[in-house]
Amino acid sequence: MPRLHSAVPFHALHDHARVAALAAALVLLPACSLLGGGDALSTMPVSSTAPGTDERAAAAEAALAAASQAWRDGDALAAMSIATRALHAGAPPEHETRLRRIRARARETLLSEQVVQLTVLPTLDAVADGSDVAGVVRFQNRSSAPVGVDRTAEDSSESLVILDVTRRDYDVYGNVRVTEFTVHVPLGRDLELAPGARAEVPFAIRADDTRLTHTGFATLEIRGQLRAVAIRVGATEFFDALPLEPAVVRVFQRGYEPLAEDPMGSLVKAVAKRSPPHILIAAELLAPGERARGVELLNAAADDDPPLAFVCKAAVDRLNDLLAGGDE
């Protein structure tokens, strides 16, 4: 069985060597389509003495284990290199899909962590019903080489930031409705980033997309990717779609601001006043450290006042989701 040599951990290299090693590792892989296409494998000559099926399966299994371990250890460069070599050697179909998945995730991680990081930064994390959501997408050069992103190129479409927004509407009866929409954000200019430098591209989600049509609140989970004409790192060009670090914005009914000043106190008052909308909104506004106490309070309120149980259960379900690591 062929021996698998792990790559040198990326963080152990000096700055210039890091850029060179990363560029060399990435350019040997097929660039992803600007339209988010597949993970095609480069054509490699097949040896006339290719190993048999059993040997290939054993080698692929060993490579999968090694790549998975490297990924768990945080060494994305090693994970990508191991998976790529195994795919070039000819992995059986039952291993190929998993190796491709590891390679794609590792490549994406390397580009976003070691080349340019993109982060969604809303101006506010909570807005009133029917308000625009404004913010910026921040580009940060995390490499030791200059990074450039051109706004457009001859015979090519413009570079765009694609915001994929998932809207979840929560009502006082515990119903959750999920809708999705996309916002296209042109760069507007060429970006040139020195090592460590930042640039910001503004975005806006229209008020029409934040209107509430129910009694409750909504969350907007903003994810997406940069689809660039090309990304230049020193003398190397990449054509990958880079992911954005996501953000969540909450949309509340107008007049919610007083509840936000003291969410726990507001929740206690809302239960005493038997106000379902205020119970749900105040529970959503609780700080992370107050959520467990909020669950206890709401469960007690449901037992003490059965007509309020419907909204107390809706709020408890949402708080339990947040406590389990749901969207913030």
Image (cartoon, rainbow, N blue to C red):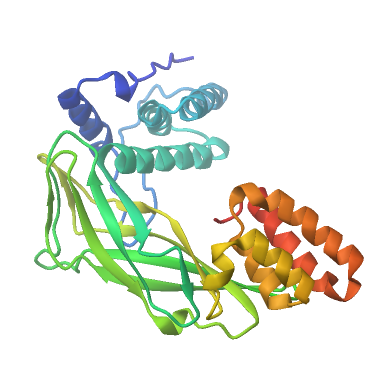
Q: Report which quarter residue 145 is drawn in.
A: top left
Q: How many marks?
A: 0
Residue found 36% across the figure and 28% down from its top: 81
Left/right of residue 27 with respect to residue 2 in the rendered view: left
Residue found 48% across the figure and 33% down from its top: 91
Q: In the depicted view, which residue is nearer to us: 16 or 289?
A: 289
Q: In the depicted view, which residue is nearer to us: 187 or 259?
A: 259
Residue 14, given in percent of the width and then of the height, sits at 20, 20
Residue 74 drawn above or below residue 184: above
Q: In the depicted view, which residue is nearer to us: 46 or 167?
A: 167
Q: Report which quarter residue 26 is drawn in.
A: top left
Residue 327, given in percent of the width and then of the height, sits at 56, 56
Residue 105 drawn above or below residue 272: above
Residue 294, given in percent of the width and then of the height, sits at 72, 56
Residue found 65% across the figure and 51% down from its top: 290
Whether residue 214 is visible here, answered yes or no, is yes
Left/right of residue 236 with respect to residue 298 in the rendered view: left
Q: Report which quarter residue 228 is drawn in.
A: bottom left
Residue 247, given in percent of the width and then of the height, sits at 44, 57
